[in-house]
Amino acid sequence: MALVAGTRLGPYEVISAIGAGGMGEVYRARDTRLERNVALKVLPEVFAQDTERMLRFQREAQVLASLNHQHIAAIYGLEHQDKIQALAMELVAGQTLAERISNGAIPLEEALPIAKQIAEALEYAHERGIIHRDLKPANVVVTGDGNAKVLDFGLAKALSDDVSMQDASHSPTLSMAATEAGIILGTPAYMSPEQARGKPADRRSDIWSLGVVFYEMISGRQIFAGETASDSMAAVITLEPDWNALPANVPPRLRELLRRCLKKDPRRRLQAVGEARILIEDELSGTNVPTPIAGTGETSKRRPWMALIVAMAITAAVTAAIFLLVQPRAQGPVVRKFSIAVPDLLLGIQTPPVISPDGKKIAYVASAGLWVRELDRMEAQEIVARVSPHYPMWSPDSSQLAYLAGQRLWRVAATGGQPVVVSAATFALGGSTPGGTWTDDGRIIFAQAASVSPSELLFVSDQGGDFKELLARDDKTESDLHKPSLLPDGKGLLFIVDHNDGGADTIEALSGQTRKTIWRLKNEYLDAPVYSPTGHILYRRNTGNAGIWAVPFSLSDLKTTGEPFLVVGDANWPSVASDGTLLYSDEGESLHQTVLLNRKGESEGIVGEPKAMIRNPRFSPDGSRLTFFEGITRSEGGIYVRDLRRRMDVRLTFTNRMNLNPAWSPGGDRVFYESRKGGAAPEIYARSADGSGNEDLIVKEGTYPCVSPDGKWLAYSAIIPTRGLKLFYMPLEGDHRPMMFLDAPGEQRNPVFSPDGRYVAYESNESGRYEILLKTFPKGEGKWQVSTNGGTTARWDRGGKKLYFVQGDTLMEVDVATQPTLLLETPRALFSAVAKKLRLDFSYDISPDGKLFAVVQDATGDKTVVRSVHLVENWFAEFKNKQKK
């Protein structure tokens, strides 16, 4: 359906038509919210009305929208209105390569920079597990200043149409779903032989297409032109390119690059597009490389005198080689970079990956298991399965790993075997525990979970024993100590200090009993400091120019000796081996969505669009609205209220604080939530649910808010120094004086009132693991255990006759009777989270009528989510010439 100027799709107002093709009609439009022009791609109606295809497309579009590169046209969003589905994308002003090539071949000096930029775009996407699948001249726009932008990244995989094709050289994209069934993805004239045969595409398919596009740019001719799609696909499979059609000035090494890109067998094809990018850069810079290559088109054109020149060159080279062999020579270290894809069905790598001290192995957590990958092998080994470990720590000799799981510290051989308990704890361990290290003298040092305990550095013998305090924070100025890492040669320990005035802004060292500030950036978030044998401290900077930074450092003086510099942008979790090899990870986040499930765990609908991070869905008292946290990261998001009928959102928080755990007032007119600035203690605020007015500070230090059914009381958790989280309550009218509700061994958190207000259900780990318990309110009398095998996140139904909680990855249900006395039945399982990829650990809620559960679900589809870790040997070699001596 054609759109006329002035048509509105959400915030986008159509200005004029740009063009049309197999992927739909494209319009120039104005984003009225951000005041910028965009390209609006309206999907074919037959596709937009196909629910299954649309859901697949939405999932793919969300992943593709994460691409952020100067040579990739950005995806801004997906809009739905009536029967129209449209994709909002960056509007790139310029000429497509197809239009440029129609005027003739592009001179080599102009084509090379364009090819380099296309290769950079592909390299960036491939590192993130994303394949273009339909690279062609029509999908590359070159702006007036020579900047190339690649369009429609990965869209071919999600789109589907069955338009017949008469002109295969400009045919619409063939994009049906099941490649395993032999259906084609791509444009016939530019697809790889494996795509033409109906086989799945991978990054080598994009390398083929890059070769075809580069060939066409410099020759002005299509390689595999045909009258129909079938003709083109047959040519791709059977015919070789006409190498004599290339201009005579194409250097031999570029000819060889094209030959390697256009090998029909993907196993013999160029395996990484980065290699193509490097060769093109060498050609542009004039870097000398060995030439020529036998068998190129130039061989037969050499003149007789060339033999003499070649002979003289060989003689000179041999003489130089002999001279160099007998002379001392200084050869700088060579930078080598490797990427390792880590497949996982849910969230990829879940805690910081670490490289072993000897630089031969890496360890990471994925699929709720602990994995070790020896770098001289292709496959990783899962050495501990299904225990959701956190923060693996290598032993100094690289033979063992320590990790945290189930309120215990464990160690296990790096080759696998039976794990051994080092020590148990009644305080907080788990997902928020911020890091640890294993020392040469047999101590394991780590930090407590700052969100639920007084933060301090602890240690225990690797042979077992009790946890002991290594370093306590100054509670007057410091809110948190975390991410300890070892300095070599017994020099001490690095760690991060969070300050009460906000900001994880200090790297400190502990040497003996002496603390020393190493690096401080006020109002910046720093994280994960590690020492590098190159004489630097590497650390993660989370704000501003985010990424991994390095600052020169004197190990003998324990002080910085220069200015910091960016090592890798948009990267995380640096880890360094004793030989200086750097390991780090991408910034990737999985996509999530809120789903509504019935009591059988079957989906009854999806709430909103997939986002990088969604947490804490809670139904309003009348069930018409849902409040939740949504964002890119915890500090880059906010609390929202969604009208489920009108499908409209109201955002309640706009600060850069972490805002979590929303809870409704009984009348549904206010939302209470916790808010944390930097490393400071969390505070509890409230704001009108319609977004009007200002937020009100309710509790100076508190977390997990819950309002009583009569609206008179607020229950919450707060930290008592040296004792951990305890339960409090305070009146919401009058003097707002906090009162202790429960001070028991261990920690207590996440209180929830029963609908009649007579009981409070809460989590406590006084037994060594978290269980759901009940006490009367407000006297706190009695104690009844609800769960029998661990439990978190209690929720009551509206009638107070059922209590729900999470046990591992299963939602449990308990029948409750409160009259004449309290009676609890045996818990029973409702549904498991695993098969449906639910994230019960991100919280959940039950609707007032008891029929629906709001649960966060992984939204990345049925395919494997891929995260990458990256290794760099001699990482500083590429920076040392830029640093001041």
Image: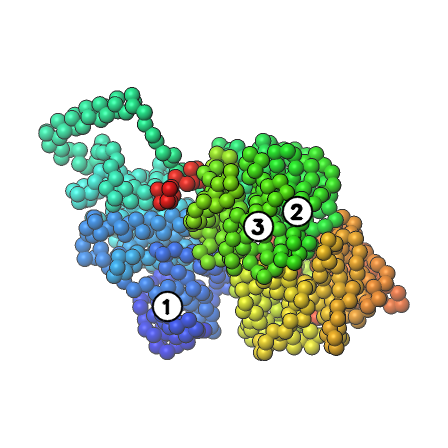
Q: Residues within 10 Å of mark 3 (few under 14, many from 20)?
A: many
Q: What's under tag 3, amino acid-wise?
A: Ile
| Residue beneath disc 1 | 38
Q: Residues within 10 Å of mark 1 (few under 14, many from 20)?
A: many
Q: Is residue 814 above or below residue 540?
A: below
From the viewer's side, name the closer residue of 180 and 537. Answer: 537
Residue 383, how many percent across, how many down?
Answer: 61, 37
- In space, the residues marked 2 and 1 are separated at their CA atoms by 54 Å
Query: Residue under circle 2?
Result: 471
- Which numbered disc, 2 or 1, marks the residue that appears first in the sequence? 1
Q: Name above or below for residue 171 compared with residue 278.
A: below
The CA span between labels 3 and 1 is 43 Å
Looking at the rendered structure, the number of numbered marks drawn on it comes to 3
Do callouts 2 and 3 mark residues in contact (Cβ within 8 Å)? no
Query: Under tag 2, what secondary structure?
Result: strand
In terms of image quadrants, where is residue 463? top right
Q: Residue at x 65, y 54 (%)?
A: 474
Label 2 Cα neighbours within 10 Å, binned few <14 / some 14-19 / many ≥20:
some
Residue shown at 38%/35% (left/top)? 334
Which quadrant is the N terminus positioned in? bottom left
From the image, state whether disc 3 or disc 1 is nearer to you.
3
3D distance between C-alphas at marks 2 and 3: 12 Å
Which residue position holds label 3? 496
Left or right of 117 in this view: 635: right
Residue 397 lies, in percent from the top left, at 58, 31
553 on left or right of 659: left
Q: Are marks 2 and 1 in contact (CB under 8 Å)?
A: no
- Secondary element type, mark 3: strand
Amino acid at the residue labelled 2: Leu
Which of the pair 420/512 is nearer the observer? 512
As helix, strand or loop, the secondary structure at mark 1 comes to strand
